[in-house]
Image (cartoon, grey):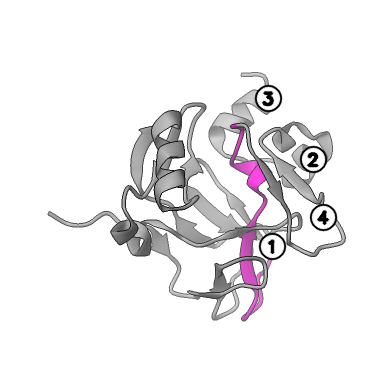
Amino acid sequence: MEKIKCYRSPKTEVRQSNIGGVGLFAKDNISKGEIVFIKAGHIVQYKEAMKCNKDIGEFDVQISDDFFLVPKSKDEIKDLVVHFNHSCNPNAGPDGQITFTAIRNICKGEEITCDYATITTYPYKLECNCGNKECRKVITGDDWKLKELQERYGNHFSWFILKKIKGL
């Protein structure tokens, strides 16, 4: 049986990050609109995702109101974690549910980041370390509701969040 794995563009690499832990970096220039990564993992509900976070680290990606993609063991981190960090001024974002594209041109050496407001609605609070002038300082599961972010990111929200924004 073939192992499930995330897709990372061959133009990317994982290495130490100034934002936190490890991050995903461009090892070549990436053009706006290019696929940067596609997330994979075990599909679990909220309660199990939070247990996985507690047991092995916070590697979940929310894919609907109550479903998440997660690794279930430390052994799966290599294959099921993309290692993208949050930024209040990101260069990548969701294009659908599990596909993430460059939302602007990304230069070689730049860390690939995503605003967690575009992918998360569950209750959480994160002190931001992105260092951008646009930094919100504290990131929460309600940030997707901010009109400024909705205007800035347009359709670059996970589909289930877009449905909430558009009142569908």
Q: Are marks 1 and 2 in contact (CB under 8 Å)?
A: no
Q: Mark 1 points at which residue?
A: 104
Q: Distance between the residues labelled 1 and 2?
A: 15 Å
Under mark 4, the amino acid is: Cys
Which quarter of the rendering shows the N terminus? bottom left
Image position, residue 106 (x, y; %):
65, 71
For the magenta stretch, what is the residue range?
Answer: 105-122
The residue located at (56%, 57%) in the rendering is 101
Under mark 3, the amino acid is: Lys
Report the residue that reaches farthest toward the right.
133
Instruction: Give the mark nearer the N terminus: 4 vs 1.
Output: 1
Q: In this view, does 55 lie above or below 8?
A: above
Q: Residue 69: give its label.
A: none
Instruction: Give the mark nearer the N terminus: 1 vs 3.
Output: 1
Q: Are marks 3 and 2 in contact (CB under 8 Å)?
A: no
Query: Which corner quadrant of the image does residue 46 belong to?
Result: top left
The residue located at (87%, 61%) in the rendering is 133
Q: Name the residue under label 2.
A: 151
Image position, residue 65 (x, y; %):
52, 27
Q: Name the residue under label 3.
A: 166
Task: Tell me the mark number nearer the camera, choosing from 4 and 3.
Answer: 4
Label 2 packing within 10 angstroms: few (<14), some (14-19), many (20+): few
Instruction: Give the mark nearer the N terminus: 4 vs 3.
Output: 4
Q: Is residue 168 above or below residue 112?
A: above
Q: Residue 135: give its label.
A: 4
Under mark 1, the amino acid is: Arg
Label 4 packing within 10 angstroms: few (<14), some (14-19), many (20+): some
Q: In this view, does 138 lie above or below 74?
A: above
